Image (tube, rainbow, N blue to C red):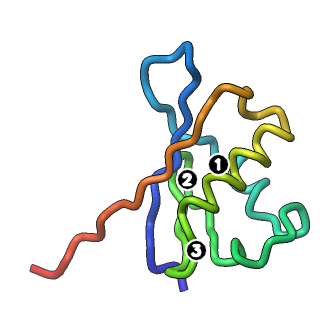
Amino acid sequence: MFARKIRVEYISPDQSRKRPCPLKWMDNFAMRNFTNASMFDDTLPIADGQMEIGAAVPLDKLREAMEDWFRRKSYLAKDSKLSLEEIPRAGPD
């Protein structure tokens, strides 16, 4: 079900580097009773800056929904952005 691993980071305009998104933020987003969006049912936060997601979860929609939720919760400033990037899986040798 969780076929993909992604890196979730945020950056504020006054910062010069990306920072891992706290697990607490991602856990809060992943609770379906808050988002009420079934397309995000296949999301599993695993650590700061790391999440596993299903093959059908669109990264662009996930980023938009997470940014919106984090702003409503005052986790993310209005002019801050999220970066979601798929982590390539190591293939068999």
| Mark 1, other Cα within 10 Å: few <14 / some 14–19 / many ≥20 | some
List x then y, in percent, for residue 16: 43, 18
Q: Is residue 3 left or right of residue 29?
A: left
Q: Disc 2 marks which amino acid? A: Ala
User: Mark 3, residues whose alpha carbon is within 10 Å: few (<14), some, or many (≥20)?
Assistant: some
Q: Are marks 2 and 3 in contact (CB under 8 Å)?
A: no
For marks 2 and 3, the one nearer the N-term is: 2
Q: Amino acid at mark 3?
A: Val
Is tag 2's residue or tag 1's residue first in the polypeptide sequence? 1
Q: Which residue is mark 1?
A: 23
Tell me the quarter of the image containing the C terminus: bottom left
The residue carrying mark 3 is 57
Q: Answer above or below: position of 23 versus 18.
A: below
Q: CA distance from mark 2 to mark 3?
A: 19 Å
Q: Residue at x 87, y 70 (%)?
A: 36
Mark 1 or mark 3, which has the lower sequence index?
A: 1
Q: Residue at x 89, y 61 (%)?
A: 34
Cβ–Cβ below 8 Å for labels 2 and 1? yes
The relative height of residue 58 versus residue 51 in the rendered view (above or below) is: below
Residue lying at 50% horizontally and 32% vertically, measured from the top left: 19
Q: Residue at x 66, y 52 (%)?
A: 64
* Real-space CA distance between mark 2 and mark 1, rounded to the nearest whole angstrom: 5 Å
Residue at numbered disc 2: 47
Task: Say which of 90 and 65 sits in front.
Answer: 65
Q: Residues within 10 Å of mark 2 (few under 14, many from 20)?
A: some
